Amino acid sequence: MFGYAGKILYVDLATGKTRTEKLSEETAKKYVGGIGLGMHLWLSNTKTRMDAFSPENPLVLALGPLSGTMFPTGGNGHAFISKSPATGGVAEAVAHGTFGTELKRAGYDAVVMTGKAEKPVYLFIDDDSVKLRDASHIWGRSPGEADDVIRDELGDYYIRVAAIGLAGEKLSKISGILNDKTHVAGRTGLGAVMGSKNLKAIAVRGTCDVAVAKPAEFLDLVQEFHERMKGPAAKKYRTLGSIESLSINNDLTCMPTNNYEMAHFMNADKISGEVLNEHFVIKIIACNSCAMRCEHEAIIREGAYKGTMTRLEYDNVWALGPNCGIDQPNFIIKAAERCYYYGLDATSTGVAISFLMDCHEKGLLSHEQLEGIDPHFGNANALVNLIEKIGKREGIGGILADGVKVAAETIGKNSAELAQHIKGLEVTGYDLRCLKTAALGAAVSFRGADHTRSGVLVLDLKGIVESLKAEVGRGKLVKEFEDVTNLLDSLMICKNAKGTFYGELVDIAKVYSITTGIEVTPEEMAVAGQRIQTLAKLINTRGGLTREDDTLPWKVMNKPVPDDGPAKGSVVTKEELDLLLDDYYQARGWTKQGLPTKTQLKELGLEAYADIVKED
């Protein structure tokens, strides 16, 4: 096959035994690659509900047909899929950089890892040579340190590494998997799944060629998309980076502040994209095969943390800044660096700390529980100290290390009303009270609170729809956006490049056909996007998630936006949420309880999983 390597690698971490299976053209076309292929491999290698930390829970690493090619952003990505310890449903996270490129060139479309190693190990994939190596000497070290040690040990700087930090080793449900030191498959607790298997890292070296079906047409596409990425569709990422969203959201009064106590941050100008780029950003880096260059590396030039350098983007700046009431760049940069050091998802970490600050200010925690830390909103020292404790699972940090849902269960006293999560996954930096299309997208997101599973928030932010209104028709919009996003994450195209696909499904079908030689229509790709979404729903249903889990945090539904501005007084009522859910399920052809029908499963070629759903 073209585009695909045509091979799936299976690794039993308990025995060290490996085997390969052929990837058929039928399976490749049906699930595309990336998250689609990954969820298919996970579901087909499990039979019943299981604990996320069970050795039988597969950890799947999957690539797309564009991986390893020079297609802009599509050549470099990878996806991890498993069962989430945070939500009980789909654990899914995508990252880019160079790691995915190397794995494809080693000759694989996916790696399925099962079992648990007796002692800490790392997996070394060197083309056809696949070995487990002792990782005792790097257990406890940061992902960046592990990366350096492994490359030195193997004697090749160009080996690419994905690793977990101390948080993953200690099974923190808000830990992720880092590649290239600052690229994180960060959401849903995948670092903990990897840690539960005693797998510290995956190192890859590949020397195989990746062939495409129509080289001349493919090169024309590469040139065309390079030009598109130099245009207005990607301007934000090329200039200020995703941090530009901070000022945009704040001006619209839709940036969660102080754990959803407000929707506007008074001191946003102190940490704006302009300020950070002028005074702190030292270099801008591109992933392999990318024309945008969106990775903004910032450095602290003076003060106690002088010399600290790390990656900044909207997600970690928001979570560790306005969400915690912090307006001091030095402390935000240091906090972000500590998250990378411990292998923590910065979004979930910031939300967990803001939850603690909220609990403290409302008198739900004793001084003994806080161990001398004064976690009020705006306390930058407390922010950094708490990340250290979370990363090490020490004291109060141990309560936060599994996310706000578990922390609220531990603290009690109505603290669940302050816990900003959906399905157990912490919210992201967009106020769902005043972005009601995005609120629906977050409620039905198969991995929990997240704006990237559909990207539908752009309709609210750009005024394409009335953002403060819940109405019939929003469900169809969310469905369509989800299906396109599913395809991009299966092709492994960076979502920052979504705007360069002017024709969406038309462009996606063209890219896929020219790369693989498998001719598909836009309509067939739309069905594939629907199939991938349905696959995720099946995994969540097996995990015990129901319509009741397609909900929103308490504050979103009960605490109106207090700030003066266009969103003042906005909230998503139970009636509005039910209307939106009914509309979405109808758009998907699902039942009132949000389940696909057995007829639909047969139409999508998923009838083998019909036993998972029960029709009304």
Image (cartoon, helix red, strand yellow):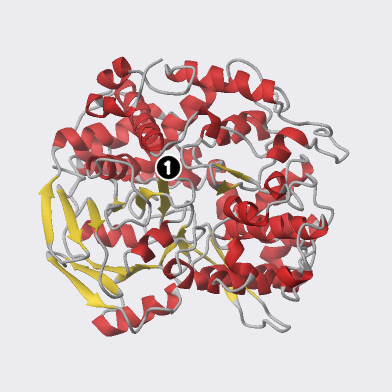
* One can see residue 282 in this view: no
- Tell me the element at label 1: loop
Task: State the residue at coordinates (19%, 61%).
Answer: 12
| Location of residue 147 (image quadrant) | bottom left
Q: Residues within 10 Å of mark 1 (few under 14, many from 20)?
A: many
Left or right: 446, with 121 as reference point:
right
Task: State the residue at coordinates (71%, 84%).
Answer: 304
Left or right: 490, with 564 as reference point:
left
Task: State the residue at coordinates (49%, 51%).
Answer: 86
**Closest to the observer: 249 or 538?**
538
Task: State the residue at coordinates (44%, 75%).
Answer: 144
Give the x, y percent position of residue 188.
Answer: 47, 51
Give the x, y percent position of residue 192.
Answer: 42, 61
**Closest to the observer: 372 or 6?**
372
Give the x, y percent position of residue 10.
Answer: 18, 55
* Residue type beneath disc 1: Gly
* One can see residue 561 in this view: yes
**Closest to the observer: 118 or 240?**
118
* Residue position marked by numbered label 1 in the rendering: 89
